[in-house]
């Protein structure tokens, strides 16, 4: 019987491309949202963390400037709240609750820092419960990204280099 013919070994398959890596500096949530939009045409439609389920879009924050006079009746106060263009309709009950608490305690509410005004590392530590001391990479999890068609997209892990 004839000897087996020798054939060259199959050529190796090309290596997989490395995951896309961006070495950029992002400090705040809006910069992160802008990055996904400009670099990948993705919209950050929602982001939540364990201690703050609504990081993005941020919740509205109101201070004492929108509250009716504390000597007003609750009915009058609610009418004023509903008529105030600075208060979104969906937030009327929240502002009324703030007014009720201020009326009861005599203390005006302190403004709450918006998640848009916080650094990403501050958010991940305070609202995400992440221990960031000595870390070089932080996993940014809990984001919902949508494409140009408005469909949710899956994405690889996103890490923030600190």
Image (cartoon, grey):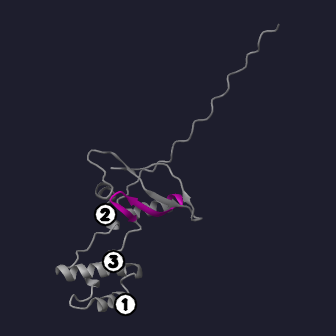
Percent x, y for residue 9?
67, 22
Residue designated by label 1: 83
Outermost right residue: 1
Image spot of residue 92 (x, y percent): 36, 82
Please tell me which of labels 1 and 3 falls first in the chain.
Answer: 1
Q: What stretch is highlighted in magenta?
A: 39-55
Which numbered mark, 1 or 3, is in the foreground of this view? Answer: 3
48 magenta-colored = yes
Local secondary structure at mark 2: loop
Q: How far apart are marks 2 and 3 (CA)?
A: 23 Å
Element type at mark 1: helix
Residue 48, disc: none
- Residue labelled with disc 3: 94
In contact (CB < 8 Å): disc 1 and disc 3: no
**Quadrant in the picture for residue 2:** top right
Q: Are marks 2 and 1 in contact (CB under 8 Å)?
A: no
Q: Residue 118 carries which label?
A: 2
Magenta residue check for 40? yes
Is residue 45 shown above or below 72? above
Mark closer to the observer (2, 3): 3
Q: Where's residue 14, x and y in %?
A: 61, 35
Q: Nearer the viewer, mark 2 or mark 1?
A: 1
Q: Is the magenta stretch mostly helix, strand or loop?
A: strand
């Amino acid at each position: 019987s004839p000897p087996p013919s020798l054939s060259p070994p199959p050529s190796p398959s090309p290596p997989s491309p490395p995951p896309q890596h961006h070495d950029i500096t992002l400090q705040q949530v809006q910069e992160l949202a802008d990055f996904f939009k400009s670099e990948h045409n993705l919209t950050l439609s929602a982001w939540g963390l364990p201690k703050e389920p609504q990081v993005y879009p941020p919740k509205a924050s109101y201070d004492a400037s929108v509250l009716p006079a504390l000597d007003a009746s609750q009915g009058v106060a609610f009418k004023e709240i509903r008529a105030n263009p600075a208060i979104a309709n969906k937030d009327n009950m929240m502002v009324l609750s703030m007014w009720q608490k201020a009326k009861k305690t005599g203390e005006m509410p302190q403004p709450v820092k918006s998640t848009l005004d916080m650094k990403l590392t501050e958010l991940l530590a305070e609202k995400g419960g992440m221990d960031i001391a000595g870390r070089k990479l932080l996993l940014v999890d809990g984001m919902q990204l949508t494409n140009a068609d408005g469909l949710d997209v899956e994405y690889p892990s996103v890490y923030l280099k600190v």
